[in-house]
Image (cartoon, helix red, strand yellow):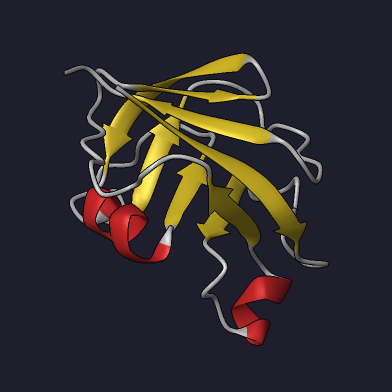
Amino acid sequence: MEITAEVTFIGNQAVDEQTNFLLLFDESASEDLQQVAIIQHFLTSRNQFKLDKHAQLIIDQTLYPINFVGDLVNSQLSTIGHAVLAFDKCPAEPLPNSIYLDGPLPKLHLGSKIVYQMGD
């Protein structure tokens, strides 16, 4: 199963290449949050999120294998479109709202597609 989102806004403080993470929210994010976040609009239904370490993310046709999915990720993506994409090794104490991915920090732009691929 796939769930697809499109980047509709990139906050002016959303991308810091030193941190290797991206903060995602849907359009319901407050103005303050929007300044530090990537806003995604879901093109398909998002009430079926079941990401796990066997899932993968595709951003603008580049595959990012998932190493770890925090306990809060699926519920928060389903309700407020929120997750932290961490392009780094999973720490000993991972954040519950984070998806830890293999690969470099992507260069997102308006219209970038984020595809969440899950097993059945």
Where is residue 96? Give x, y as percent. Answer: 26, 56
Is 7 situated above or below 101? below
Q: Nearer the viewer, residue 94 or 15?
A: 15
Where is residue 40? Give x, y as percent. Answer: 59, 53
Residue located at (25% from left, 17% from top): 54
Q: Residue furthest front?
A: 44
Placement of the N terminus among the 4 image quadrants = top left
Residue 103 figure quarter: top right
Q: Nearer the viewer, residue 24 or 95?
A: 24
Position of residue 45 in the picture relative to residue 47 (left or right):
right
Placement of the C terminus among the 4 image quadrants = top left
Residue 67 figure quarter: top left
| Residue 2 visible to the viewer | yes
Residue located at (54% from left, 76% from top): 29
Is 52 situated above or below 78? above
Where is residue 31? Give x, y as percent. Answer: 67, 84
Q: Nearer the viewer, residue 50 or 14?
A: 50
Where is residue 22? Give x, y as percent. Answer: 59, 50
Residue located at (18% from left, 51% from top): 71
Residue located at (75% from left, 53% from top): 16
Is 84 situated above or below 101? below
Position of residue 24 in the picture relative to residue 108 (left or right):
left
